Image (cartoon, grey):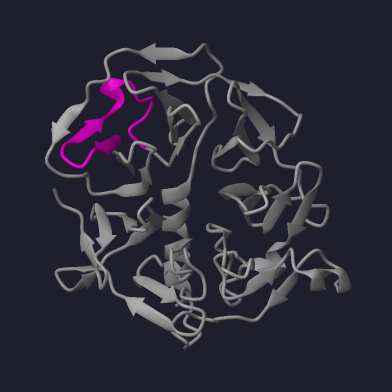
Amino acid sequence: MKLNILLFLSILTLLTSCNGQTADKKNNTNQFANGDTVKELGNSIMVVYQDKKNVYWFGSWETGVYKYDGKTLINFTKKHGLSNNRVDEIKEDKLGNIYFVSCSPQSTIVKFNGQSFTTITVTKSNEWKLQPDDLWFRNAYQTEKVYRFDGDNFYELTLPKPPSHPNPFEIYSIYQDQKGNIWFGTNPVGVCRYDGKSFKWITEEDVTEFRNEGANGVRSITEDQNGDFWFNTENRYSVYDSTILKSSKFYIRHESIGSLDGKNTSGLNEYLSTVKDNNNNLWFVTYRSGVWKYDGTKITHYAVQENAKDITLFSIYKDKNGGLWLGTHENGAYKFNGTAFEKFRL
């Protein structure tokens, strides 16, 4: 079992790693962004995103990004202007520009304005701010840095270390909560909240553990219908509840669902990605054990298979219509049809 866990962690680190930093050079625009029309997605889809025009974007591990408008699937790669064929994050600004973050072998941000790709120049800064329209992006593997975009400029910022954990760490996830505060999930020092004025930490000891077999890092952050937080672990956390005033910490940790299968199975007490659907159900994605739905009372398991064999999963995404999508490591993208997850095909 211990060997399997170590192998699991090694694979996840490889899949989520971002090696290097954004090049310090002038923005470079490529005007040849026509793309190639294709009939299917690549195998390894890391992230799914739906923009304001209801166009879907699929970021892959090694074959660039795919654009799907409901009729045509177009593939963009380095030859069309991407800085890298790996896409780890996709976000959109208020003007409708799309941003693709590539984290390996060099951390870069590329903007797509609908016609061309531009590699973004990033300014290093020590000045932390928090504004409602900011976009936040992960930086590089084995760094404590993030990117903040204020609508005009990108800033590279270094997250301060928690006082009780001065060792190096890396940032796995970023989440903006319902109050507008930003959370950073790390490995291996826990999760940090930035409210525009100060940084507060829920340290590794209180967040994530593989039952004495190592740490997975905080790869997923979400809020449930009651406003409690879930940090890819078996527990839930009250942060903004009035009862916090009686606590010596800024949060209260509650025992919650435990292992997803109810058997304390190592690996099922932590998960890679989470979303809350339109009915306030929480959906948890595991690496090799499918998807699990929690409705506040019971847990339901959805196997995700091809040829009767479980496939490895990476992420879950909820689109504007409430549809649920999965990114997988070797099997393209899947979508929930109401009863099961089926492979996305044109």
31 over 332 or under it: above or below:
above
Q: Quadrant of residue 305?
A: bottom left
How far across and how far down the image is residue 143, in percent? Answer: 62, 40
The residue drawn where x is 73% and y is 64% is: 239
The residue drawn where x is 17% and y is 28% is: 36
Read off the magenta span.
63-86
How far across and how far down the image is residue 331, in percent? Answer: 23, 55
The residue drawn where x is 44% and y is 78% is: 1
User: From this viewpoint, which residue is outermost toward the bottom?
Assistant: 263
Q: Is residue 1 left or right of residue 175?
A: left
Instruction: Give the total number of marks visible in the rendering.
Output: 0
The foreground one among 182 and 308 is 182
Q: Is residue 317 left or right of residue 328?
A: right
Report if residue 78 lies within the magenta region: yes
Q: Is residue 248 left or right of residue 275?
A: right
Report if residue 131 lies within the magenta region: no
The foreground one among 39 and 23 is 39
How far across and how far down the image is residue 281, in percent? Answer: 46, 71
100 over 189 or under it: above or below:
above
Q: Is residue 168 left or right of residue 309?
A: right
The foreground one among 206 and 282 is 282
How far across and how far down the image is residue 18, in percent? Answer: 49, 40
101 over 50 or under it: above or below:
above
Q: Quadrant of residue 158?
A: top right
The residue drawn where x is 39% and y is 55% is: 317
